[in-house]
Amino acid sequence: MSERKLFAHEIEARLDELLLLKLRQRSAEQAARQLETLPRVRQERVLHWVGIAAQGANELGWQLASQAAEHAAELGDAFDAWARAGLAAHDGGGIDAARQAWQAAVEELRAAAARPSGSVALAEVEGRLNRFLQALHGRPLRLASASRAWTDGETLWLPERLDRAADADGNRRLYTLLAVQLWAQARFGSFNVDPEPELSQWPDRSAALAWFALFEAMRLEARLEAELPGIARDIRDLRGPWPAALQPAADSLARPDATAADSLAWLAEQRKVGAGGTPIYPHLTGFDPLAARRLRAVRMARDSKTLRRALNIMRAVDPHTRGGAGDREQAPLAAEGDALPPDLQAEELQGLPPDAQAAAQSLQQDLDGMPPEILSPAGPGAWQPEGREESEAPVAEPEGRPDAVYDEWDYRREAWRRDWCHLYESEGPAGEDAWVEGVRSRHAHLIRSIRRRFESLRGEDKAERRQLDGEEIDLDAQVEARADRRSGSEPSPRLFIHRRQIERSLAVMFMVDMSGSTKGWVNDAERESLVLLCEAIEALGDRYAIYGFSGWTRTRCDIYRIKSFTDRYDAATRRRIAGIEACDYTRMGVAVRHLSGLLQGQATRHKLLVTLSDGRPDDHGDEYRGRYGIEDTRRALLEAREKGIRGYCVTIDRHGADYLPQLYGPAHYSVIDDASQLPRKLAEIYRKLTA
Amino acid sequence: MKSTRSTPSDSSARAPISALATPLKQPATEPYYHAVGDEVDVFAAAAQSQLPVMLKGPTGCGKTRFVEHMAWKLGRPLVTVACHDDLTTADLVGRYLIVGDETVWLDGPLTAAVRAGAICYLDEIVEARKDTTVVIHPLTDSRRALPVEKRGEYLTAPPDFMLVISYNPGYQSVLKEMKPSTRQRFVAVDFDYPQAEVEARIVAHEGGVDAATAGRLVKLGGLTRKLKGAGLDEGAGTRLLVHAAQLIARGMNPLAACTAAIARPLADEPDTRNALDDLIRAVF
Ligand SMILES: Nc1ncnc2c1ncn2[C@@H]1O[C@H](COP(=O)(O)OP(=O)(O)OP(=O)(O)O)[C@@H](O)[C@H]1O
Ligand SMILES: [Mg+2]
């Protein structure tokens, strides 16, 4: 921006206006004087954020203004991120939290300036690392930060910051390398043997663990050599050659059939020769098999229960699928190491529902194979329904007569619960006018570019040939007319091309998650993305509706009308978008049923139900939580499908990839890692979905 | 309109130009195709029973190559039409042209294929305009007929004529789903990425690289496929792996080759791009 700087009195005037300072008998004079020294672009950024903050709470705007006056110069390009951090903190903890966050961000910036230039923070690589890990086989893993790199088999902890390598690229690779080794511990069974008998024989337990970790690192490196050779090469480069004394161990643990038990055997060997401390290597991670085994035990119990149940149901449905297993007692979980021929497993597992398959795979990973006992369904009658009896489930006080009642699917009984959910439909509460205007002006640029792209979608108008009149001459028709004239038959007068905008014949229902978990940033992101989306769809002319859903047990399922198919995108609608707020729980099935009913009434050829959510189906009381809710929602989506309605889900739940394929099918959902990306992405997803 | 059949030049005829004027050629050598399941048998049986076939599967998994291979194997000519959203009925069936002062009829690829008893492959049928799918309906049931309205002709397909369409079910747009009334006319063959060893053999053969390199490319492909729905609309198809192999065979550094041929075509979003780069580095 080449514009001149604002003078202090101009800044003061703008702050006055944004923060209504006159009314509050406060003066922005000092802040304005400090801000006067900034370049114009930065001055505008500060005023911009003060405006946003003031929308949330006037005091927040004031705080931001005073803090910014002090730190904006020092923050430089980091100013936006700094401002955002405070607003996010304010959502959860109010003004104090915001102030603390701002202070912390300034300190963090100062610390960063003092750090070696090549250092890399986990936060910087988290996104790519998460994606990277998703591509690897095995049970999904979470990322978290800790002082040391280690894993319990479900979460990977990595240091908050790495600066060991010479440059940023080196440190990024180090992150990948650590993460992959931890993944390998979980994937290749480092925790599948009980090390306790051996460890307990060592006088120095931590020395024993260190040796165990080293032997495991040798074994896993060889596995990586086969799986991810590039990583294995990086490890080799980092560690240099093993000492001659350890080479035999490294060689024997590199055999493809070596297991953690072999590492333990080398550990025993080491104890007998009276080993001292381990050599130190930069690539080694922390190693805590005992913590990992505790989780493993819980997980295995859960997984085998899931799997048994599924096998029982399968057999109940089709008793001929497997013979002879019926008279066997339900055996306890097999001892470790009972492997099964791999082909049998694959065949056996095929027909199972996805969650049971996931459980089976997880078990396989935990056992280096599948014990036959788990695969044998228990005898008749052994299957017990899980969860509480319905009478125990908490029920909210009914309020008047529901607008509709819906059945709900109980997967445990394979039956419907009739008239189970009471649904109340009401108009969404109105929010502030200014909020939507704020979004529109803040994102004016983005909105313009989205609209342009959407218009080009609509702009693909089709040439209708053989019209009585039109903008162009239809050459084909002319030629034919001529041929007809020559052959003596009557030529057609339809000789023109008329360009007509194609009828997209599409109705879309947006179903917005208003559960309590969306409070704060997520809710803002949802609302913002709806505004952008509306602006975009208006350019397109599709029929669309927006409804929010929330609920508190089956007797209180709420649907809020934000925009019906007939409502226009006018000030009232915009106020209702602004008024979307986080309420209670996510009883999803009933919402899908109700809204697909509304959608079905639309006379368009294509019907699309887009869910915007932040997590899996859930409700108060644990009945709807977990499998029950997922199965019911899946049913509801299947019913919708039968009515010709296609479902799509946009979620910001990182673990969405675990259950969404079950609900929507593999291609029909998107996971967005970062809520702040939602506004930008949602319109794009919609465009792709309907291109 | 794209068609593998070349159109005759204007001067070549005064009378109605039939596509038979340029005989539909078959390739001299057998197009390389490595069977993945029972698709060869299913296709051959459908051909014998005069049933149309629908190939379903993600992009770049060998559908087009398979049809080329089967056409060669059955000894029938092949007409391929890549469908797009401006493809009209006339583009498929045929139209009049003016040559000198005469009007001349030119068969479209579909008509030509019917006349010649060829295999007509409509690639990505959902891309075509809705009204074009209607003209194939009478060809796909027991009538096996193609009305050429403009000429008042009603062609009955000879036994060797076969209609094949392809369709990518992973398609994102709701507006492009195929109607059940169309789908249910076809014998469907599901395509998926081949098993790792098979795919490695394909990549080695097509890309001209050694088995080890092909194995790594296939491994990389498998990893990207797990990112479907999480950053990627679709993982890398065999085609992309072959492309990377070809670059490597020309002496390009594998990392650069994979970035150019696999990572870049797949993703724009920074996290996903970076993760793909990391995966490439992890595999090579
Ligand atoms: N089974 C196979 N045998 C031989 N080559 C294969 C096979 N599968 C894939 N290929 C290779 O992959 C390339 C892409 O395959 P092809 O063009 O047939 O894909 P497609 O399924 O038609 O993709 P699209 O849906 O994008 O048209 C081929 O050129 C060939 O090199
Ligand atoms: Mg093709």
Image (tube, coloured by chain):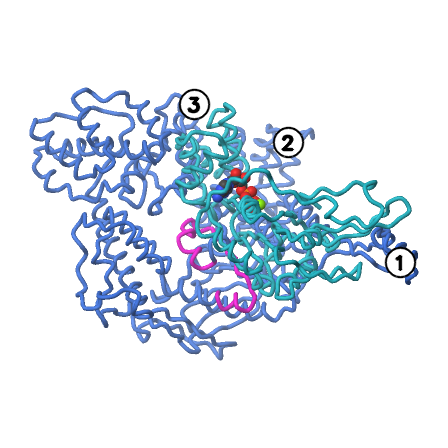
The answer to whether tags 1 and 2 share a subunit is yes
In the rendering, at what x and y percent does residue A613 appear?
A: 48, 56
Ligand 1 under 8 Å from disc 2 Cβ: no
Quarter where residue B6 is shown = top right
**Badge 2 amino acid:** Arg
Quarter assignment of residue A573: bottom right
Q: Magenta segment range? A: A638-664
Dot 2: element: helix
Dot 2 corresponds to which residue? A40
In primary-sequence order, the first of circles 3 and 2 is 2
Can you say whether A498 is above or below A598 in the image? above
Q: Colour of chain A?
A: blue
Which circle marks residue A117 in the picture?
Answer: 3
Among the chains pictured, the one given cyan colouring is B
**Front disc: 1 or 3:** 1
Q: CA distance from mark 3 to mark 2?
A: 29 Å
- In this view, the mark in front (3 or 2): 3
Amino acid at dot 1: Asp
